C-alpha cells in the first residue's frame, strides 16, 4: 500500500499509481484537490474504488479527467 505524497495538488505534480496498487490519501482542507496519474498503453477497463466520510457523497470528493498528453479529452464527476 502506498500513501499519497504532497504536493500533488495539480496535474503536473500528480502521484503516479501503478496497476493493482492501493493508495491512501486525505483531503485535509475544503477546496483541496489531489491528483493521481495512471499511464495506460492500450484501451481497457480501470476499476476505481474509494471511501468517503459518512456525512458526504462521492460527488463531494471525486472526479476523473482523461488526458491525452496535456489535452483533457473527457471529464467525469
Image: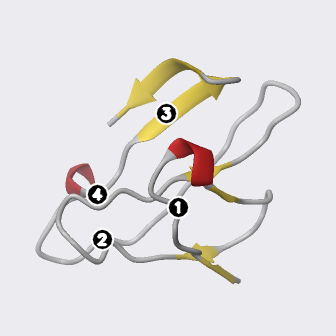
Which residue position is annotated with label 3? 65
Marks 3 and 1, the one that precedes in the sequence: 1
Which residue position is annotated with label 1? 8
**Residue that lies at the very extreme toward the left in this rendered image:** 55
Which residue position is annotated with label 2? 52
Marks 4 and 1, the one that precedes in the sequence: 1
How many residues crowd mark 2 within 10 Å: few (<14), some (14–19), many (20+)?
A: few
How many residues crowd mark 4 within 10 Å: few (<14), some (14–19), many (20+)?
A: some
Assign the N terminus to one quadrant of the image. bottom right
Left/right placement of residue 76 relative to residue 45 reads left
Give residue 21's position: percent from left, percent from top. 74, 69
Q: Give the structural element (helix, strand or loop) at label 1.
A: loop
Give the distance between the C-alpha atoms of the residues marked 4 and 2, in whole angstroms: 7 Å
Give the distance between the C-alpha atoms of the residues marked 3 and 1, in whole angstroms: 15 Å
Name the residue rendered at 18%, 77% in the picture: 54
Name the residue rendered at 39%, 77% in the picture: 26
Residue depth check, mark 4 versus mark 2: number of the one nearer the observer:
4
Name the residue rendered at 17%, 66% in the picture: 30
Which residue position is annotated with label 4? 61
Give the distance between the C-alpha atoms of the residues marked 3 and 4, in whole angstroms: 14 Å
In the displayed structure, 29 sits above or below 61; it is below
Residue depth check, mark 2 versus mark 1: number of the one nearer the observer:
1
Give the distance between the C-alpha atoms of the residues marked 4 and 1, in whole angstroms: 15 Å
In the displayed structure, 52 sits above or below 3; it is above
Marks 4 and 2, the one that precedes in the sequence: 2
Amino acid at each position: 500500500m502506498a500513501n499519497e505524497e504532497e504536493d500533488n495538488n495539480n496535474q503536473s505534480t500528480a502521484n503516479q499509481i501503478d496497476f493493482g496498487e492501493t493508495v491512501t490519501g486525505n483531503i485535509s482542507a475544503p477546496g483541496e484537490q489531489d491528483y493521481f496519474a495512471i499511464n495506460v498503453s492500450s484501451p481497457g477497463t480501470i476499476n476505481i474504488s474509494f471511501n468517503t466520510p459518512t456525512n458526504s457523497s462521492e460527488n463531494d470528493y471525486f472526479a476523473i479527467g482523461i488526458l491525452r498528453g496535456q489535452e483533457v479529452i473527457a471529464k467525469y464527476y
